[in-house]
Image: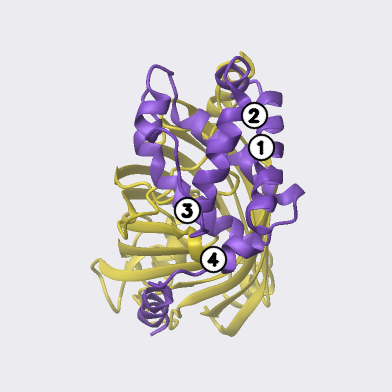
Amino acid sequence: MKNLRILSCLFFCATVWHANAVETSGKLLLTGGVTQIEGAGGGGLTPWAFIGGYGTRDQVGASAYYTNVVISDYHLESTGALIGVYDRVEFSFARLTFDTQKIGALLGLGEDYKIKQYVYGLKVKIFGDGVLDQSSWVPQVAIGAQYKKNQEGDVVRSVGADDDAGIDYYVSATKIFLAQSLLVNTTLRRTKANQLGILGFGGDQEASHTFQFEGSLGYLLNRQLAVGVEHRLKPDNLKVAEEKDWSDIFIAWAPTKNLSLTAAYTVLGNIVLRDDQSGFYTSLQLGF
Amino acid sequence: MLFPTLFVLLLSGQTFAADLSAFKAFGEKAGLVKVVDDLMINLLADKRTKPFFEKADQVRIKEKLVEQFCVELEGPCTYTGQTMKRSHKGHDINTAHFYALVEALQLAMAKNEIPERAQNKLLAKLAPMHKDIVNK
């Protein structure tokens, strides 16, 4: 809770700063991205090289979000906020709550047992402008890190994980090909997180970090509306369950710079004891 | 693999001969005049861009913008105005001002029901000009 307070305070302070007539929200609609499941500015599953929020290189932007993923046998909620400083650095925080529902009882944890995890994110834009540099093929490139702390150390160790904390490192390259109305993102992540870290880090099958590829492809229907697909490769560190790649098909709508809504159908594969997990992802984001 | 295939498609989608489809989608020169008229109305209504245009020679700016947009859409026009660098010299223009103009243009194109793909084709040609326009 302390973390959430810090973040909501930061968001509140940024909002007050915003309200005090300092110019902000300079970027174009949707070019701040939405917020991915671990709190970084991006698509739904994967971070983008774009800095979250609508601040230009002279401005500060911020956003807060709530994401709800209801799949066949589980329920995942993610909530958090981010601040984008001078379109260069992004600080983010996310709290993930994974509800085991009936599977909790089968695992001896009790029905509706919830696993919580905090994610602290940092992203830095290295070069490029994925929106404006339309005369070259050079994408916008950013590097980032996500420090993840699972709150259920005993539980994740009992399923075979080595640790309850870990750091993901990633590099993202993102570009809007405006003449084709396309957005292309590729992310390479170095991680040992099991199911985002909800099942801990490393495991009895693979203890070390591995490189995983993630991609997003979006089509800009108009300046407020985009549709697309995402795919995220995952490590497979635990003997107890085979971790599968994740994918989704999404629609994102930003009627104003202060509000965006994302809906997706997502396919997550096996998650402990249950195969073929799929369902609906919805996300609400407020910001500037 | 999905991504390499798409990149190849993107590359092969680049045309080399004059492609008048976007120019026609704008309604040719008459259509561009309407869009630019609405663009100027939007620029004067937005407090971020108003200071740059309210005291300027709006008729001349509109005329040059129509020429420029026409050329960028590969239409049969000649641009007779100054370079982007020269015409924006002395104005403190930041990235937010540049984006504000893009928004004003997007709204003007939407009002004139220009198809999205044609809109984005024009924006893709104009976007790189930020290097010569943004000077702050």
Q: Do marks 4 and 2 both belong to one polypeptide chain?
A: no
Residue linked to disc 4: A218
Above or below for A31 versus A206 = above
Seen at 49% across and 33% down, the residue is B98
Q: Nearer the viewer, residue A186 or A97?
A: A186
Residue linked to disc 3: B72
For mark 4, give the secondary structure: strand
Residue A117 visible from this viewpoint: no
Residue A195 visible from this viewpoint: yes
Q: Earlier in the sequence, mark 3 or mark 1?
A: 1
Label 1 marks which chain's residue?
B
Could you say which chain is coloured purple in the image?
B
Query: Chain A in the picture: what colour?
Result: yellow
Front position among marks 4 and 1: 1
Residue linked to disc 1: B39
Above or below for A229 versus B33 = below
Q: Do marks 3 and 4 both belong to one polypeptide chain?
A: no
Look at the numbered discs 4 and 2 and tell me whether their residues touch, using CB distance below 8 Å: no
